[in-house]
Image: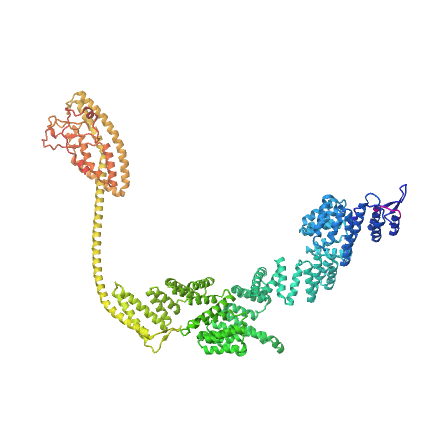
Amino acid sequence: MMDESMEELVETKTIAIPLKDSTEDEVIEINCAELPNGEEVLSILEAEEAKLSYWIEVALEYYRHNRLEPFMMILEAAGSRAGLEYNGVKQDQMRALDILAAYWMTQGYREKAKEKRTDFFSKATVLFNTADKIAMYEWSHLTVRAWFYLFEREKSTNKYELADQQFNYVVKTYPQNVLSLVGKAVIAFNKKDYKTALYYYRKAIRQRRHSIADLRVGIGYCYAKMGLTEKAKIAFERALELEHSNVSAMCGLAIILLNTLDPHSFKMAITLFGKAYNMQPDNPVVLVHLANHFFFKGEIERASTLAWHAAQYTECEPIKAEAFFQLGRAKHIGGLYEQAYRMYYQARQANNGEHTLAHYGLGQMLIHRGEYDEAIKCFEVVHQRLPNNTDTMKILGSLYAHVQFTDQNQINDARQKGREVLTKYLAVHNDDYEASIDLAQLLESYDPKRSLELYESAIMLLDTLENIQPQPEMLNNVGALYMSMKQFDKAEHCFKKAQERLEELLSTQMDAHLLERRTMPERSHLLTIRYNLARCLEHLCRTAEAEQMYKDIVAECPGYIDGYLRLGCITRDRHQVYESSLWLKNGVQFDQSNPVVWTLIGNLHFAKSEWMPAQKKFELILSKIYNNKNPDPYSLVALGNVWFEQLLNPSRKKEDEKKYIDRALQMYQKALKLQPKNMYAANGIGCVLAYKRNWNDARDVFSQVRESTSDFYDVWLNIAHVAMEREQWMPAVQMYASSMKKFRKENDPTLLHYLGKAYYRAGMLSEAKEVLEKAMIEQMDNTQLKFNYAIVMKKAAKEVLRGQKMSSEQVKAAIDDLSFAEKIFLYISKTEERQSNPNGLRISRTICSDEARNCKDLLTQANHKLAAAQSQDEEERRLLAKQEQELQALKNKMMEEARQREQEELDKKVREKNLRSSFIDMTKDILKLPEIVEEKRRGGGGRKRKNEDGEEFVNDSSDAGNWEEGEVGEDGERRERRKKDKSSKKASRKRRERRDSDGSDSNRKAERKRKRQEERERKAQEKLSAKQSSKIKSRAFLSSSESSDDDKPKKAADSSDDEETTMAPADEFDSPVASDDSERETTTRKKKKKAVVDSDESGSGAGSDSDRPIIGGSDNDEAPPAARSGGNSSDSDAGPPKRSSPRSEEDSD
């Protein structure tokens, strides 16, 4: 940095020093290429009283030529001997002080000894303070002073801030100052703001006329920190082009080449480091990397030496940490673990714990020292910084699996972290059997199924990869896992295989000394495997084999306490209490401080209701084994149970009741304080509250216990008992039933007894009887069950006999119940002594005798009521039979009425169908008449011709009247024909629709055939004579005779009116068919044209005029035009009205 400051000055070839008192500007020239002796130059400057500026220039020339002694001598003498009487002397004084301070600053930066470095910095500080008094805010002075702050940053943490403030001031005042820009870049780089540093380095390069290699090196380091290695490589190569001997550029480029992992690049990097080492043998960066290189080459001593020198030559904390790490690694591989531990520790401390590999090495040394908790901390730091490093995962997981802490919570946390880390590791390396075994051990109690899978996988990997048979310990663990999963057959197989494997290993050890030294732990393992096998046989109900194995174990190893415990438990389960106590006492002889043995002995006394011995055993556990400092919660709860059971003893003293309650409650509270989640202690407190009849508080306690764990059978029963005491019968029934279902105790006699009592209290006697019968089947010798069953039957019989209405069957059932209850009471009362149930409650024979007499009295009453019930049943049966007969008659009547209604409906439908058929036939006949009309028209035409010839009929009216009337008649006939054509079309369409709606084609053909036959018969009956046919001339009205008895003319159209009247009743039916036929009939009446020919039945002779037929007009309701216009003419030939033709009458029907 001093070199850069010196280059700011103007380079000269010669220095001209003016002579003192010279009038002709005479000077003394000093050749810069050949500088004379420093003392000679000093004497010249002093003799000529040269200005201070000349002193400074001469001193700088000596510095450029690396002649530091004359440089220092001239600058130090300038302060007192130089000429100061000129303008600008203050600026030169400040400049001289800054140059001298910069020299001492550079010397202090290069000095390795701390004391000397401090002395140099102190001299520089004095000079800078003196210069501050002359011109504090001069930009050149502030620049050098700011660099001095960067050099002594280790003394104070705020030096960076002071330097940054001064650089900012200089950059604002003089933006072209390169040193201030470089200073800003250095500050930004050390703050890890690499983009800002890169910006200032680039700006500094733009301000310089000539490129400087160090600026390129700074740019290269910025790119390297930003991850742009290619650009960093280009920057270092450019720096080496500008300055071939730049060691910093060599180091940077070599590091980049090393990280490529390319063999050729690796050789180039080592070459660069060697070249840099030759130029600067004390460069710590070069030394550290060369030490790393020689370490991997196996030259440990050389690597250690280089690392040691690197640590001595640097004050940079990261480089020093790397040097110490290289030293620790060299000592580690040499087996010098204590020295390695110190080196790793210094490497971790050197850079404030930032060196990650130093934590890794230190963790390894801590494992060797047995300090697992501290080792875990080191590897946790490495795992946090390198989360994907599998080596760290494996080591850390193994540490978590085996570390032991005093606090159980810390142990649980460590195990959980171990499970997580090893699971992550095995996801990457699933073929690592060591990690599989560690994780399996961690999962044994957490996830047995997964643990078993890992053990089996490890066994397979050992066999496949290493061709190694599984160790007996692994097989023992696998068998234990199978036992925990209730797969006892597989567990037995594993235990036997482990036993065989271990016995095989013991038999192969031939050396007696080796056998004695190695077989002790293995023999203890063999005992453990045999013990586990015996436990497995117990679960397989092979108790005899297990018992023999336990006896063999305690015979071979008398101090094996677990064997005595199991023998005591086996004999206890066989109700051999005395033998059980003997086995347990044998265990006490070998270990009197074992709380399990004393607990089992206390439980034996408790089961036999020996309260005092049980109390002493549990108090012994609390006082002597645990010394009342950290008491056993189980013993506290058991002692509380002892005090509480004495409350239920019928022979207790009344005055001791409060003492028992207080002591029981005290024990339960202590246990709950030690273990806040101890459900047995909480349940005991609830029992005490229930005994004190604090039902609400007891219910709350029991409910809280059930909420915390729903698998505690006792608390369910206690809740039901509290409901019973509060006379909440149905909730009690539900709770008893729920507990039976949840815990699969449907056949438990005690619980069935409780449920029967709840049913009895709830008045559900049939359910109570059924439940008690089931309980009696399960426990035939329980006298209390029999007594309660008799009570239930007696009460059920009494309920029946008290009823107002009872059947004989009910009375008979009641008699049977009373008879059976009487027998039960007599059986209990005739026994020699009072009967007791398993709970110790006794039943008095006197009470049973009284109950038997009551049953006998009730039987007498029941026999009297049986006759009444039978007579009542007979009366009820008679009434029931009568009611059934009446009901049957009513049903028959209703069925007859329904049948009649159905017949009427059927007849009605038949009539409607016949009527509809008649309407259809009439319509078809009408639609066929136009052919007949055409024949009559042709005949009419002939008749008209006869009239024109003057034959036959002679009209009485005038010729004009006849002509006019005939003309009108013809017009009317044409109108009628048009109406008829329209009517025929509509009728044809309706016929087609009706035909489609009728039955099948065969039915329609048969119907048409029948109707044609009827038509032919009708025509044969109504056929006119030839004479009558020849007299029909037109549709006009003709009189029957000139000498008619009635001269009042009648229109033949009246017959049409009669026909309408006859057909009218068709409208009276409301059925859709009749309505449709009526509509069609109305349309037909309006449009049809029909000739009616009738014989005269007035009684006149055949040859009279009365025999002349009446020929009517059309069926149109309107009268012909002549009749409307002329009215009733006296000359009309119309005769009296006649009845309709047979066909018309038939249609009207």
In-image side of 541 versus 997 (left or right): right
The reply to whether residue 1132 is in sight is: yes
Residue 665 place in picture, x, y as percent: 47, 68
Residue 1093 place in picture, x, y as percent: 16, 32
Q: Quadrant of residue 559?
A: bottom right
In-image side of 979 versus 323 (left or right): left
The reply to whether residue 569 is in sight is: no
Quadrant location, the C terminus: top left
**Above or below — where is 504 with respect to 1005?**
below
Q: Quadrant of residue 918?
A: top left
In magenta segment, residue 899: no
- Magenta residues (range): 47-52
Residue 435 place in picture, x, y as percent: 58, 64
Which of these two is toward me, 932 or 525? Answer: 525
Please tell me how many numbered marks the rendered image carries.
0
Residue 1087 place in picture, x, y as percent: 24, 32
Magenta stretch mostly in which secondary structure? loop
In magenta segment, residue 51: yes
